[in-house]
Image (tube, helix red, strand yellow):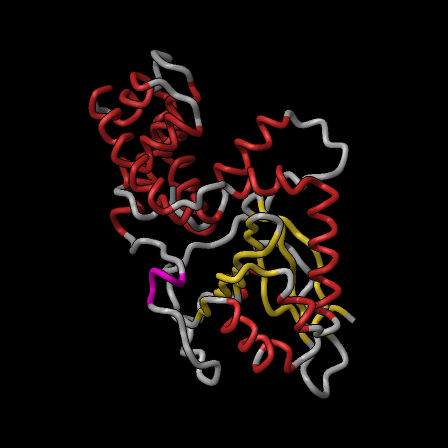
């Protein structure tokens, strides 16, 4: 709903306080979970009305054509933020494949970003019907409206999201690549990045690759510009990468070492978006507040 773990924390706190205060008046006419979902949904809708829409780099402005000036940090509750995965996919996992696919699709960066282009009630209707699996009548009860209004909101939301989503979700891309293929791709990425082998690295990207880095406004579109940015800016320093997962997507904690310093410092959380077995986007989050959410060490020896 909110595209930010920090905003979700605020909504959760408001939900729990409202539930505690209203518990004495809960009469059991609906399930406790339904009652809590109604409170949480209303908390989210209030936050959506009060705060600016969370955006991605391409929403903020056009791609940069020069690597010399990356612009000033854009502060405040502006950007879509990553959500660390509580569940770490692992070889031999017993999770039902359909459940894993649905879970990954419901939190993928592209899906969350697309939701931010919807009014609050349309977001809620889409999530209730397609992610939580509520009927139109159940969603209508939660939103204090009619089933017809829910279905109408759902149809409008589906069209908007469909227009902004890639043809295949990241969950499907990962499924097609397979565990062995994914591990090969990630190992090649780490090896090329840490050795600063730019030719090998860009061979892993699609021709329309993108590199974003909120809260900086700068982002680069197309393989040529991404390669130029890496050569001229990214690989001016050595790096070490540590794997992680967020939003159902693979990524890395990226540690950099400045001249004259004998340790590597956490500089970015970078998530990968894949297409046809290659890397189509690198979402590099530079905000230290985002980094803290992952509970990672700030330095590596």
| Closer to the camera in the image, 241 or 158 | 158
| Closer to the camera in the image, 24 or 10 | 10
Looking at this rendering, what residue extends furthest in the right direction?
301
**In the image, residue 203 lies at what x, y percent?**
64, 64
| Quadrant in which the C terminus is drawn | bottom right
Left or right of 183 on screen, residue 206: left
Look at the magenta stretch and give its main secondary structure. Answer: helix
**In the image, residue 182 lies at what x, y percent?**
69, 47
- The residue at the point 20 percent across, 25 percent down is 149
Q: Quadrant of residue 128?
A: top left
Magenta stretch in the rendered image: 57-61
- The residue at the point 52 percent across, 72 percent down is 224
Compared with residue 145, is residue 234 higher up or lower down, i.e. above or below?
below
**In the image, residue 218 lies at what x, y percent?**
43, 72
Looking at this rendering, what residue extends furthest in the top direction?
29
Compared with residue 258, is residue 54 higher up or lower down, i.e. above or below?
above
Count all numbered tags in the image, as a single digit.
0
- The residue at the point 69 percent across, 53 percent down is 185
- The residue at the point 60 percent across, 44 percent down is 85
| Closer to the camera in the image, 242 or 301 | 242
Compared with residue 71, is residue 147 higher up or lower down, i.e. above or below?
above
Left or right of 83 on screen, residue 111: left
Left or right of 69 on screen, residue 245: right
In the image, residue 244 lies in the stretch drawn in magenta: no
| Quadrant in which the N terminus is drawn | top left
| Closer to the camera in the image, 105 or 200 | 200
**In the image, residue 87 lies at what x, y percent?**
64, 38
């Amino acid at each position: 709903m909110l595209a930010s773990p920090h905003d979700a924390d605020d909504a959760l706190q408001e939900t729990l306080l409202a539930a505690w205060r209203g518990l004495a008046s809960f009469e059991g006419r609906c399930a406790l979970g339904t009652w809590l979902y109604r409170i949480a949904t209303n908390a989210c809708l209030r936050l959506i009305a009060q705060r600016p829409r969370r955006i991605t780099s391409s929403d903020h402005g056009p791609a940069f054509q020069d690597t010399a000036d990356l612009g000033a940090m854009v502060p405040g509750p502006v950007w879509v933020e990553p959500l660390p995965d509580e569940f770490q996919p692992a070889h031999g996992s017993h999770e039902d494949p359909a459940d894993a696919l649905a879970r990954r699709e419901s939190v993928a960066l592209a899906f969350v970003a697309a939701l931010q282009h919807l009014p609050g009630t349309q977001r809620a209707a889409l999530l209730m019907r397609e992610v939580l699996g509520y009927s139109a009548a159940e969603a209508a009860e939660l939103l204090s409206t009619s089933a017809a209004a829910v279905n109408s909101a759902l149809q409008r939301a589906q069209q908007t999201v469909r227009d902004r989503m890639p043809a295949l979700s990241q969950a499907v891309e990962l499924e097609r690549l397979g565990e062995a293929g994914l591990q090969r791709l990630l190992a090649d990425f780490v090896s090329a990045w840490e050795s600063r082998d730019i030719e090998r690295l860009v061979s892993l990207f699609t021709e329309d690759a993108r590199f974003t880095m909120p809260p900086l406004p700068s982002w680069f579109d197309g393989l040529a510009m991404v390669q130029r940015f890496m050569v001229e800016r990214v690989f001016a320093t050595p790096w070490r990468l540590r794997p992680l997962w967020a939003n159902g997507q693979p990524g890395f904690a990226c540690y950099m070492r400045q001249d004259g310093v004998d340790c590597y410092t956490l500089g970015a959380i970078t998530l990968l978006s894949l297409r046809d077995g290659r890397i189509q986007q690198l979402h590099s989050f530079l905000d230290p507040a985002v980094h803290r959410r992952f509970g990672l060490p700030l330095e590596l020896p």
